Image (cartoon, rainbow, N blue to C red):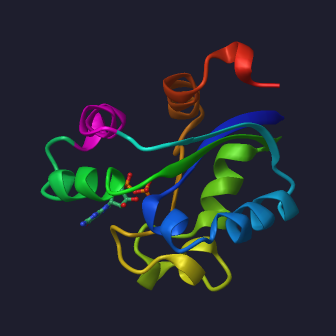
């Protein structure tokens, strides 16, 4: 089933100038790019995006990281996009990420882990709507 999902190339990926390398991998994996935005999240936006983690001990640190510099946000489409993106990303902690995954190759810590990907079709729909008006997706 053709499905959409959302990915964010986090500030560590942008500052390391690895957006091209990550996007190349995503395209090789068969993802079509339906929309792209570059933006620098405000604290309020980052807190809203990660609201589900508000009670976690790392929340303040995560928000600080996600607002430290620009991010690239991409709307992606592929068969089984949500699960496949999570597979290609690798585990949250790069120490546990399978070899060849984006996080295994580009993440430097459990927090500075290069890329975000929606974890369910429901969250993909919410996260796509957070960043893209539906009419902007081709
Ligand atoms: P994801 O779905 O793999 O991105 O992981 P989560 O939804 O559990 O966490 C969201 C983001 O919070 C992760 O991608 C990391 O950037 C950060 N994070 C998760 N767990 C930790 C942690 O234990 N410590 C710190 N400092 N950051 C974390």
Residue 138 on image: x %, y %: 83, 25
* Farthest top residue in view: 135
Residue at 60% x, 71% y is 17
Percent position of residue 35, x then y: 72, 35
Number of marks drawn = 0
Q: Residue at x 83, y 58 (%)?
A: 27
First to last magenta residue range: 42-53
Quadrant containing ligand 1 reads bottom left
Residue 87, quarter of picture: bottom right
Q: Is residue 7 left or right of residue 45?
A: right
Task: Tell me residue 54's x, y (percent).
Answer: 19, 41
Q: Nearer the viewer, residue 82 or 11?
A: 11
Q: Residue at x 60, y 65 (%)?
A: 89
Q: Position of residue 13 (x, y in %)?
A: 53, 67
Is 43 part of what is drawn in magenta?
yes
Q: Quick one: quadrant of the N terminus?
A: top right
Where is 28 relative to 125, above or below? below
Residue at coordinates 73% horizontally, 60% vertically from top-left?
Answer: 23
Q: Is residue 33 magenta?
A: no
Q: In the figure, residue 42 lies in which quadrant?
A: top left
- The quadrant in which residue 80 appears is top right
Q: Magenta segment, principal secondary structure?
A: helix
Which of 16 and 103 lies nearest the eye of the viewer? 16
Which of these two is toward me, 134 or 56?
134
The answer to whether 128 is drawn above or below residue 72 in the figure is above
């Amino acid at each position: 089933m053709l499905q959409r999902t959302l990915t964010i190339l986090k500030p560590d990926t942008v500052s390391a100038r690895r957006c091209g390398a990550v996007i190349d991998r995503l395209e090789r994996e068969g993802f079509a790019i339906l929309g792209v935005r570059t933006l620098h999240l405000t604290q309020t936006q980052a807190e809203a995006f990660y609201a589900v983690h508000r009670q976690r001990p790392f929340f303040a640190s995560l928000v600080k990281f996600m607002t430290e510099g620009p991010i690239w946000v991409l709307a992606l489409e592929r068969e089984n996009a949500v699960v496949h993106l999570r597979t290609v990303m690798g585990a949250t902690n790069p120490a546990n990420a399978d070899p060849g995954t984006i996080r295994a190759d580009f993440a430097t810590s459990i927090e500075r882990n290069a890329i975000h990907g929606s974890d369910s079709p429901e969250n993909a729909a919410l996260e796509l709507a957070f960043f893209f008006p539906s009419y902007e997706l081709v």
